[in-house]
Image (cartoon, grey):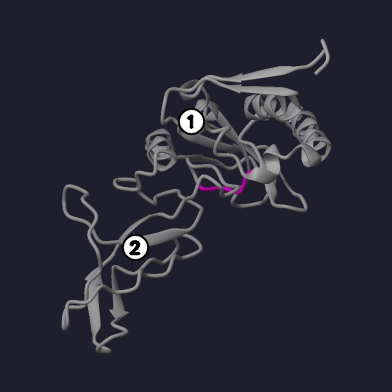
C-alpha cells in the first residue's frame, strides 16, 4: 500500500440505498427519452410528458425497505403482482379452498394495465381452482434497474460481462465511484448492519473489474450532466 492510496469508509446506515432517492434519472414510459423524477412528479425531457403520483415518495421508501404492503400501482410502470392480505395489510398465503394446501405464488405481470379484479389459482395437489380477490402491488427488487417511485427503467445503466450496473442519479454514481476506486475499504457499521455497499454483488467489488466499472460510472456522470 502506497502513501497515495485512496480510502473509503462505510459508516453503515448513512449509506443505505435510500440515501440516493432525492431524484431519479429514468427513461420516459411513453417515449423512452430521459426523464427526471423529483418528489411526486416525473417530467420527460423528450415528449415533455408530466406525470404526478402523490404517493411516489412513500412508495419508494416502502419498496426499498421491502415493505410492499400499502404500495399502490397507480402510475406505476414496472412489474406488478397480486397479493393476499388482510385489511390491515398483513400478508397471507394462498391456500387451496378444497384441500387446504399452499398454492404456488401467482405470476407477476409486466405492468399495471388491464389488471383483473379476481384471479384463479389451480392446486397442484387436488386440481381444484380457487378464486381470490386480487390486490395488486409493485413487484420490485432493489437489484432491478428501475426506480422505486414510478417503476421506470433507469437511464443510467449499462450491461457488463457479469451483470447490469446502474445508479439512480449523479450522487449515487459518485458514491459508488468512490467505493469502487478506493484502494482501502473500511466498514464501521453497527454490528449486524449490512449497508448498501456490503450488499453489492461480488462482481462489482472485485478488483479485476475495477477499471471497467470506474469507466462506466464516469460515463454515467457525464451522461447525467445534461439533465442535472
Q: Quick check: is 64 in the magenta stretch? A: no
Say which of marks 2 and 1 sits in front: 1
Regarding mark 1 in the picture, which secondary structure is present there? helix
Judged left or right of residue 190, residue 169 is: right
Whether residue 173 is visible, yes or no, is: yes
Q: CA distance from mark 2 to mark 1?
A: 25 Å
Where is residue 190, by image quadrant? Answer: top left
Viewer-proximal residue among 83 and 204: 204
Residue at 64% from the left image edge and 24% from the top image edge: 171
Q: Position of residue 52 (x, y in %)?
A: 46, 38
Judged left or right of residue 204, residue 50 is: left
Q: Position of residue 170 (x, y in %)?
A: 67, 27
Viewer-proximal residue among 113 and 97: 97
Query: Mark 1 sits on what residue?
Result: 18
Residue at 70% from the left image edge and 17% from the top image edge: 7
Where is residue 60, by image quadrant? Answer: top left
10 Å neighbourhood of mark 1: few (<14), some, or many (≥20)? some
Query: Do labels 2 and 1 touch, CB within 8 Å?
Result: no
Q: Quick check: is 152 in the magenta stretch? A: yes
Instruction: State whether residue 92 is above or below residue 199.
Output: below
Where is residue 185, by image quadrant? Answer: top right
10 Å neighbourhood of mark 2: few (<14), some, or many (≥20)? many
Query: Mark 2 sits on what residue?
Result: 82
Instruction: Tell me where the magenta segment starts and ends, as one range.
Output: 151-155
Regarding mark 2 in the picture, which secondary structure is present there? strand
Amino acid at each position: 500500500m502506497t502513501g497515495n492510496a485512496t480510502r473509503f469508509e462505510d459508516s453503515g446506515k448513512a449509506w443505505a440505498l435510500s440515501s440516493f432517492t432525492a431524484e431519479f434519472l429514468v427513461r420516459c414510459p411513453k417515449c423512452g427519452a430521459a426523464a427526471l423524477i423529483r418528489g411526486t412528479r416525473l417530467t420527460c425531457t423528450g415528449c415533455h410528458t408530466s406525470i404526478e403520483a402523490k404517493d411516489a415518495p412513500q412508495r419508494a421508501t416502502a419498496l426499498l425497505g421491502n415493505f410492499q404492503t400499502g404500495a399502490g400501482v397507480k402510475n406505476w410502470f414496472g412489474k406488478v403482482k397480486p397479493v393476499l392480505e388482510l385489511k390491515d395489510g398483513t400478508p397471507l398465503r394462498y391456500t387451496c379452498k378444497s384441500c387446504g394446501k399452499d398454492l404456488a405464488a401467482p405470476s407477476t405481470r409486466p405492468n399495471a394495465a388491464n389488471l383483473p379484479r379476481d384471479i384463479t389459482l389451480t392446486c397442484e395437489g387436488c386440481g381444484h381452482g380457487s378464486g381470490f380477490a386480487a390486490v395488486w402491488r409493485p413487484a420490485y427488487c432493489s437489484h432491478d434497474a428501475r426506480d422505486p417511485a414510478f417503476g421506470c427503467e433507469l437511464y443510467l445503466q449499462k450491461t457488463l460481462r457479469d451483470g447490469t450496473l446502474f445508479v439512480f442519479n449523479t450522487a449515487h454514481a459518485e458514491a459508488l465511484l468512490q467505493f469502487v476506486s478506493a484502494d482501502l475499504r473500511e466498514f464501521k457499521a453497527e454490528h449486524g448492519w449490512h449497508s448498501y455497499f456490503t450488499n453489492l454483488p461480488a462482481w462489482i467489488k472485485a478488483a479485476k473489474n475495477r477499471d471497467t466499472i470506474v469507466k462506466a460510472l464516469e460515463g454515467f456522470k457525464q451522461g447525467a450532466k445534461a439533465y442535472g
